[in-house]
Structures are given as C-alpha cells and as structure tokens.
Amino acid sequence: MATTEKKKKKDNLHARSRAGLYETVWPLEHADVWRTQTSPGGGLPANFNKESIVRDFIHLDQPFTGYTRDKNQVYVLGGTPFLMNMYTKMYMAHATYVGDSTAADLVKNCQHIPYIAKINPVTLEHQIVELAQGRNRAENYPGGALVHKNGFVYAQAQAVLYKIAADTLEIVKWVKLPLVKGKPGTAKSTIYNGMQVLGNGRIITKCFTSQNIGKGWILQVDPDSLEILVAKLIDVQSARQMVDEPSAGVAYAYNPTLSQSRRFLITNDDFVLDEAWTADYRDENNDSTTWANGTVFMKSHVVFPDNSAPGENIAQPLHNFFHPVENPPKALEPQFAVSDKPGINFWKVAGDPYANADHGIFITFTPTNEKIAAYRLFADGKREMLWEKNYFISASPAIVTASDLLYINDYRNGHDNFVVLRFSTGEELAYIPVPEAVETTMGIIFPGMNNDVYLCSTETSGGVNSGIFSRFYIK
C-alpha cells in the first residue's frame, strides 16, 4: 500500500475517533471517544535530549484529568476525592483491598469542591471556576470533561453538567442530571462519568452508583441548551463509557455490566441494546474478580480489563478481554494482563489502533504488581508480547504516535517519577524525579502543544491544594 494511502487511512481513523471534539492534541481525558489515550501529535520532540527537559509545577487541589484547547490553553478537572484515597492506599500497600471509606474519610472529602482550572502552560498562570451546583447532591467522584467542537468546555461533577466558556471560565449553563432511585442513600451514590460526544454534537453521558446496584441512566444532551433529549435506565456498572460511529448515521455506546460486555445503538430518541453482540465475561456472583473497567476501541476488537474495583476476596490476576466487533462469541475468554498474581487497576488499557492496518499495539499494567507490558493485537484476536517492564505505574499513561513516545509514572524511593519510554520497544529514554509527589497518583498524564507533557499528581492524603500539576518541557 502506498505511503500516502496509508496516511489517509490513518488520518481517517483519527478523525473518526475525534468526531464532535475540538481539533486539538488532547480534548478528552483519554484523548478521543475511543478512549485510546493516544494522540497523533504533541508532547516532547521525537529525538529530544533528556538533559534538556525542564520541570515546572504549581499546586492545585487533587488535579485529576487534563485537556488541551488552543496552544496557550490547558484545562484541569480536580477537587474530586471520593474513593481516590482508597485506591492510593491500596497501591501503596500493594493490596487489592484496604477496607471501606471511614467516616473520617468522608468528612475530609467535604473540604474539597470540584473545579475546572484554566492554565497557561508556558507561564503556569491559572484561574479556577468551582463546580458547586451539585454540592451535597451526589458523591464528589471524578466526573470528567471535554472540549467540544463548538469551542465550549463541558464538565460534570456531583450529577450536574456544566457548559463553560473556554476563554473566561464563565459557567454559561448548568443542569441537574437524573439520580438513580432505590434504597436509602442510592440517589446520593449516583456517579456520572464517561462523558462523550457524537459527531452531531450531542453529549452522551451515563451514571452508575457506588452502591453497586447495577443500574444507571444513559443520556443524550443538547450541547447548546443542555436539554436532556433522551434518558434511559439501563444495566451498567462501570465508571467509563466508549462510543464509536463506524459509518454515517450509525453510532454505538459501549457500556459493560457486572457480567457482560454490551453496546447500545444510539438513535435520535433511544439507546437500543444490541443483544446479538452481547457477550458474558464473568460470573457476577464470583467475588474472586471484580467487574470491567472502561473499554478501548482497537478497530477489530473492543478491549477491556476486569478487577477495576477493590475486593476483599480477589484471588485472580488482572485479565484482559478481547471482544470482536464482527462475529462476536457469546462468552469472552480471560487473558492474563501482565501478571499471574492478584491485582487491580483503576485505569484501563491504552492503545494505538491507527498506525498499522493489520494490527494495533496496546499496553496493559497493574499498579499493585508494578508491571507494564505492550502487546500487538491482530485482527483475528491473537496477541503477541512486544516488551515487558517493571514500573510502579498508577497514572493514566499517554501515547503519541508521531514521536513513538509513551509517558508513564514510576513511584520509587518515596516519591513519584516521570518516565518517557519508546512506545514500540519499551526503551527508557528519560527518568525525572518529582520529589514533591510523595504518593502514587490517581491522575493522568497528557501531552501539550508546546513541546511539553503534563502530570497530574493527586496527593490524596494531603489537604486542599496539596496536589501538583507538573509541566515537563524542552527549554
């Protein structure tokens, strides 16, 4: 195949995975609606000199996810502590369970108010808008944000959706999202996450509950008025959601349950379960594993791990599942992710489905076991390991295809570290201490547009504004 034709197909895939989003390096917390954590460009130059990397930082309140817009516009969502300190404690203890949140934890959580920060990435000057309309309405769990193709920033926190002017951070509109009803406390346990967007501009979001009742609302929202156009109660148990539009007029939302991998056909007035595509991946009554994390679209397959939630009886390692887009089976076979020891991971796999027509490359990792591996996934579902490394990764990694770079963190020697690897080979290219970050982070890494990369260090055990936003760049 001619090089120009390959590039055209690759560009078409990138456009498909970013339909509805602002044209920028990192408009969604996982880069695109396929949730690949992969950007076609941005970040450090491909042949950077590691001695030339400089780090600057500011303190924010538990910075969690980040986004780019224009060259001088970076946005961070933070101040959302619910359950994050529990994961931090588990990772630090290399455990799969450390007990439920205590009353003291919940009281401490009340000190934090969700916010969006707008940051000039070169000067690190910043301003903050609080997302406080849902205070005490629902759990303060990370809700997510995106930069819409219309130029506005949309964010959700505590079951409220906000439309925010990108330049001024003015909240233009906000709307309360429906809560899940049930036994006492269920409504407050409603958690909205996995916000997405379609090519037509409609926002797709959904909720689940921290009480694990397995039901949640899935919504379509008008981006201009924030009117809820479609609301449907479905079986769902994941803090993530992935969408894909394979052809004109056809769109799917991928939402696993406690035991099944599922997708819904998105129409103008409904979400229709694709029962023929549904496949079992676990027995929901078997507590030796816990349920699925978010799905990643890898062209021929949807890929996701289990053990996304803590569990007192977890006895199985983290597994990956590969659900074929075409001709799916009725049950999926678990594959060891990267270790044969029991492990959990708040994050999911990350992958590059763009670079090669015959296969894609994805990485999988377990913080509790301090391992990461890269695999090549073929269209027939076969996989082969490319490399494996020992790093204590807790952040959501970032991949940049143009430079063949992978950005991760490694908690070591009592503090966090920023690491740059060659994505295709695993070769370590840079290792930079972040001495102020004394815990594993629950935040993400994302590339910028000024020869730079950003790390969100949550520091969940600290007080308000003890978190760290770091910029790594070539001076």
Image (tube, rainbow, N blue to C red):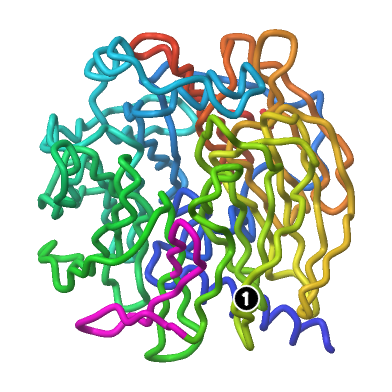
Residue 62 percent location from the top left of the image = 40, 23
Stretch in magenta: 254-275
Q: Which quarter of the figure has residue 194?
A: bottom left
Q: Which residue is mark 1?
A: 11
Vertical comparison of 110 with 267: above or below = above
- Amino acid beneath label 1: Asp
Q: Is 348 situated left or right of 112 in this image? A: right
Q: Nearer the viewer, residue 439 or 454?
A: 439
Q: Position of residue 140 (x, y in %)?
A: 27, 32
Q: Residue at (70%, 59%) from the top-left corner?
A: 334
Point out residue 302 in the picture as x, y percentages from the top left corner: 60, 69
Seen in the picture, residue 62 relative to 216 is either above or below; the reply is above
Please tell me whether mark 1 sits on a helix, a strand or a loop: helix
Asked if residue 387 can be seen in this view, the reply is: yes
Q: Nearer the viewer, residue 187 or 473?
A: 187
Residue 254 vs 138, above or below: the answer is below
Q: Is 130 left, or right, of 331 in this rendering?
A: left
Write the residue at 54% across / 26% down.
Answer: 97
Describe residue 180's horizontal placement relative to residue 9 as left or right: left
Crowding at mark 1 (Cα within 10 Å: few <14, some 14-19, many 20+): some
* Left or right side of 193 for 300: right
Pick the residue in front: 273 or 270: 273
Where residue 332 appears, x then y in whole percent?
65, 69
Can residue 448 be seen by looking at this rendering? no
- In reply to whether residue 273 is colored magenta, the answer given is yes
Residue pictured at 82% horizontal, 63% vertical = 376
